[in-house]
Amino acid sequence: MAGRIRSQDVALVRERVSIVDVISDHVTLKSAGGGNLKGLCPFHDERTPSFNVTPARGFWHCFGCGAGGDAISFLTQLEHLSFAEAVEQLASKAGVTLQYETAEGRPTSTGAKPGQRQRLLAAHAEAARFYQEQLITAGAEHARRFLTSRGFDEQAARTYGCGYAPDAWDGLTKHLRAKGFTTEELTVGGLAKPARSGSLIDRFRNRLIWPINDITGDVIGFGARRLADDDNGPKYLNTPETPLYKKSQVLYGVNTAKREIAKQGQVVIVEGYTDVMACHLAGVTTAVATCGTAFGADHIAVLRRLLMDTDTFGGQIIFTFDGDEAGQKAALKAFADEQRFVAQTFIAVSPEGMDPCELRMASGDAAVRDLVASRERLVEFALRSMITKHDLESVEGRIAALRATAPLVAKIKDRSLRPGYIQWLAGRIGEDIDTVRRWTNAAAKGDAPPQHPAARETKSTGPGYTAEREALKLAIQMPQLAGPYFDEVGPEYYNGPLHAAVRTGIAEAGGAAAATAGANWIALVTGACGDLAASALVAELAVEPIILAGEPDAFYVNTTLATVQRPTVERQVTGVKSRLQRINPQTDQDEYMRLFSELVTLEQRLRGLKEQASRGV
């Protein structure tokens, strides 16, 4: 952080800035007599002007909605800026160099230097102009061809400031130095970097460029797309972290989408630059995208400001994901983030799995608008994704589906919606509403699920199923105890599909032997599960009590794992016997002897497992 702006500088900004000039950029003002001006309020809908400006005092006030303040407060409310961002924007236009100080009033020695922000912004603005000019040169034909292949014409490229980083080591560097920018400014701003030889070279070379703007419209960084097959760099390369560019806080397209986001109470979150362009050109003007990082808490904070996401007003957040496993995993992550919003979250999935840019190319602008219009609630998508993993024709499948989905319904932040989703879930699974309600209420309290009415009729309560669940609980809750004993028994021994998925997730997280019990271990296993239902099961297993009344020990772990392995080894024995019966030992003696040897080994192992299991679970 740069510290706070000196109060003297804030006063100087207020003195030098004309409030009429600032407001006139957004509101048409007419004389109201007595030296005052009036216009239509930008903060609420009205038919007659009630928005008044008093230039002599440097203040504005709306008699319709009651809002008012000075030029700084006008920008903070209209542009959804912080106080410091508004002051810096006005200072840049007024030619005021800002000084920063600590809370005790001393000049700050860290973060942005006095005047550095303005210099870096100027360098980025000049770099954006340079890249845009390069896009129309002969050497940028392949860059223009790429844009055309994605459905963007010359006008679209100009609208979004697309550019080209020439195939040269220091084209931009030389240009900016000629404009008076220093080596330090170019490196601190992420526009250039030192070469091995010690000279300064461009950060981007032979790439298609998108300028990345902050919420005020200033260019603070760039995104660069690889064009050449022999380019060994990443497909997309972004500006590194700088005093201007903080990727966890940046949303591409937010500067042009912010007013529509606030007006419509809606934001559409897409994955890339071309998707934002495609959405905006198709009429979905609320689309934004993250820049080189996952959607996170800082992005949520920005959108809550734009959406006016309060207890009295909630908008819509619409995610666009693929319908495949990766998209379903992203949807579960988004549902976890949903708890930070008051607004309702939705998901829009193209039936063909295309992103908005591909959809626009294939089916036109209307298809993109239809995609957003056909959105469904994120919780419904997550529930459906879980349900499809189970065989609902069997009692076992329905119980497994209920076990996976009840915790998700319990997490719905708006409790008034839970009864409706309990009824929805009951209908989808084929269970009675009371059963689903009891399971959901238990999940909300962190309790183990209640006895299912048909539990005695299912194999889900058999020794093997119970042992699988017990083994997973031991690995999740007590990984140091379960340790290598658990890790030696692979997912192939787990007959429940969800159990096998969780077992695989534990392996992907590094295995129980290397883990330390606690929230971090549980989070690692949850993140490693590539299945929505398995991720939900991890949360359930983390709090479900161990069956053993006393303190579990290594003997209990071994007997539990013996019970887990027994059904699989029994099937293996049966399978080998079946194959032996189909083989003629006279004509295929080698294969017969190999299988016979395998059978002897398996039967010995099975006897050992039975003996061990008979003393445990």
Image (cartoon, rainbow, N blue to C red):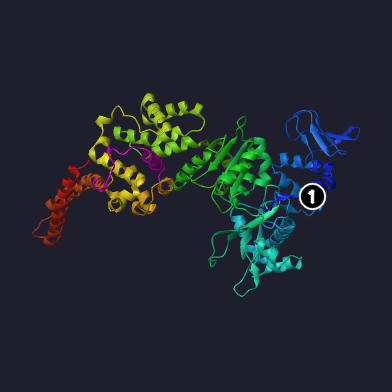
User: At which x and y percent is residue 428?
Assistant: 40, 31
The residue lying at 76 percent from left, 66 percent from top is 180
Q: Quadrant of residue 340?
A: top right
User: At which x and y percent is residue 165?
Assistant: 65, 63
Q: Judge whether residue 562 can be spotted in this image.
A: yes
Q: Which residue occupies the extreme right position in the image?
A: 34
The residue lying at 29 percent from left, 35 percent from top is 396
Q: Judge whether residue 154 can be spotted in this image.
A: no
Instruction: Determine whether, in the image, residue 567 is placed left or right of residue 115.
Output: left
The residue closer to the viewer here, 357 or 510, is 510
Residue type of the residue flagged with mark 1: Asp
Instruction: Determine whether, in the image, residue 172 is placed left or right of residue 33.
Output: left
Question: What residue sits right under mark 1 in the picture?
Answer: 9
The residue lying at 14 percent from left, 54 percent from top is 599
Instruction: Determine whether, in the image, residue 137 is placed left or right of residue 338.
Output: right
Residue 547 counted in the magenta span = yes
- Start-end of magenta stretch: 530-555
User: At which x and y percent is residue 532?
Assistant: 42, 42
